[in-house]
Image (cartoon, grey):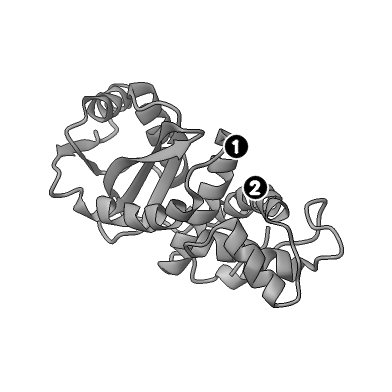
Amino acid sequence: MFRASTDKVFRPPFPTEIILQTVRWYVSYPLSYRMIEELLTERGVPVDHSTINRWVVGICTKLEARHRKSKPSVGNSWRMDETYIKVKGQDHYLYRAVDKEGNTIDFLLTKKRDTKAAKAFFRKAIRQNGPPGKVAIDKSGANNYALVSINTKLKDNDPKIIIYQSNYLNNIVEQDHRFVKRLTRPMMQFKNFKTAKATLAGIELSHMLRKGQYPDSESITP
C-alpha cells in the first residue's frame, strides 16, 4: 500500500519494506506504538517504540503529499464538519469534508475552531479539488461565514457556492470521522502539533486508499 525510495529517514539495519509496513500498521489499525513494538519483536525485529514514532512522523507527510499530486477528482457536492483531536491535553480541531459518495475531499488540523480556521480549510480544499457546487455544513456560524466570505470574492460570472446548513445531510461526514477516531483512540493523545499533523496525514491517506480513491495506488511512490 505504501512505497517509498530510500532517503535519510530510512536507515540500516531496518529495510525500507519493514519501515513502511510498520508505518502502514500504525495508520491503518487501532494499535499503539508499544503494541507494534511487541508485534515486531515477536517477528524477530526488535524496534523501540520511539523509533517507530520517528518513522511515522518522518514518512507520513511525504507519503500524503506525493499521493496528493495524483489524487483523483471528487464530486462537487461536499459535506464538511470538524472533529476534536487532543494534542498535549488541549482540544484541537480536524476539519474534514467528503462528497456525497463518501470520498474524502480534504482535511486540515487547526489549533482553533473559528472562521479563520474554516476559511483555511476551504482554501486548501478548493486549491486541490476546485470550487464545489454546494456544501452542507452544520449550524456553525464560523463555517457559514467562511463560505459566504469565499462567495463574495468570486468573480461576477463565477457560480456561487450553495450553502446548506443541515445536520441530516452531514451524517455521512460524521460517520466518516469514526475511522479517524477509532485509530487515534489507542494513541491517547498527541504530544505536539507536528506529530499530530503528520500522523493524521498518514491516517487520512490510509483511509482514502481503503475507500478505493487511488485505484492505481501501487504505481504511486513518494
Query: Is label 1 in a helix, a strand or a loop?
Result: helix
**Does residue 1 lie above or below 192 as drawn?**
below
Do the numbered discs 2 and 1 sit on residues whose CB atoms are within 8 Å? yes
Residue 19 appears left or right of 137: right
Residue 115 appears left or right of 25: left
Check disc 1: other Cα within 10 Å, few if <14, some if 14-19, many if 20+: few
Q: Earlier in the sequence, mark 2 or mark 1?
A: 2
Q: Which residue is mark 1?
A: 194
**Does residue 173 lie above or below 147 as drawn?**
below
Residue at 40% across, 43% down: 130
Q: Amino acid at mark 2?
A: Val
Of all residues, the one furthest to the bottom in this rendering is 43
Residue at 25% across, 36% down: 159
Residue 6 appears left or right of 159: right
Check disc 2: other Cα within 10 Å, few if <14, some if 14-19, many if 20+: many
Q: Position of residue 147 (x, y in %)?
A: 28, 29
The quadrant of the image that shows the N terminus is: bottom right
Q: Position of residue 208 (x, y in %)?
A: 45, 61
The quadrant of the image that shows the C terminus is: bottom right
Q: Which residue is mark 2?
A: 57
Number of numbered discs present? Answer: 2
